[in-house]
Image (cartoon, rainbow, N blue to C red):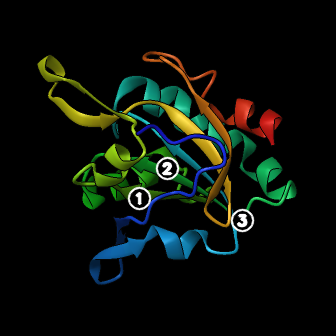
Amino acid sequence: MTISVGDKLPQANLLQMGANGAETVALGDKLAGRKVVIFGLPGAFTGTCTTSHVPSFLRVREKLAAKGVDEVICIAVNDPFVMKAWGEATGAAAGGITFLADADSSFTKAIGQEFSVPHLGFADRSKRFALYAEDGVVKVLNQGQETSACEISGGEAMLDAI
């Protein structure tokens, strides 16, 4: 099932590198009583994801906060070590974006955003999407068939939609 506006996001355990190694992050706890933007993309250190998608949210992070967004979260089907390194390499982690790993693609599959491109080594990766949720309920969902672009699912489009 593909997630839609008005749906409650599913419970999910994602991973993040912390001071003591990999830590489980209960997404439901992060969303409870908060306004959160989540964007998903095919993978860390990939071309468009690194040069366009993440920078688009970094550019609008403060403007989203001014609209009441408590947190901006980037989710990809990668391991938490890679997500931490990617957040540091892009400067986006220091810029206020949270990087969470959906290592087994369970969240991505639960919201109907998975795709595979075997010749690239992409198995059950995330399509490009961005959503805005209040208390875990989807209020805005920007998704499209974007592969090498991120206008629909980018930061500026989300800022305009909120």
What secondary structure is marked by label 3?
A: loop
Counting labels gives: 3
**Crowd band around label 1 with a 10 angstrom C-alpha radius: few (<14), some (14–19), many (20+):** many
- Where is residue 91 shown, x and y percent of the image? 53, 50
| Label located before the other in sequence (1 or 3) | 3
- Tell me the distance, in whole angstroms, between the alpha carbons under discs 3 and 2: 14 Å
**Crowd band around label 3 with a 10 angstrom C-alpha radius: few (<14), some (14–19), many (20+):** some
Depth check, front residue: 26 or 67? 26
Where is 14 relative to 116, above or below? below
Residue appearing at x 70%, y 40% in the figure: 59
Where is 118 relative to 21, above or below? above
Locate residue 69 relative to residue 106 in the image: left or right: right
Q: Are marks 1 and 2 in contact (CB under 8 Å)?
A: yes
What secondary structure is marked by label 1?
A: strand
What secondary structure is marked by label 2?
A: strand
Depth check, front residue: 51 or 37? 37
- Where is residue 88 shown, x and y percent of the image? 44, 54
Residue appearing at x 33%, y 75% in the figure: 24
Name the residue tied to disc 3. Answer: 70
Name the residue tied to disc 2. Answer: 74
- Where is residue 71 shown, x and y percent of the image? 65, 62
Name the residue tied to disc 1. Answer: 100
Where is 81 relative to 75, above or below? below
Q: Are marks 1 and 3 in contact (CB under 8 Å)?
A: no
- Tell me the distance, in whole angstroms, between the alpha carbons under discs 1 and 3: 16 Å
Amino acid identity at mark 3 = Asp
- Tell me the distance, in whole angstroms, between the alpha carbons under discs 1 and 2: 6 Å
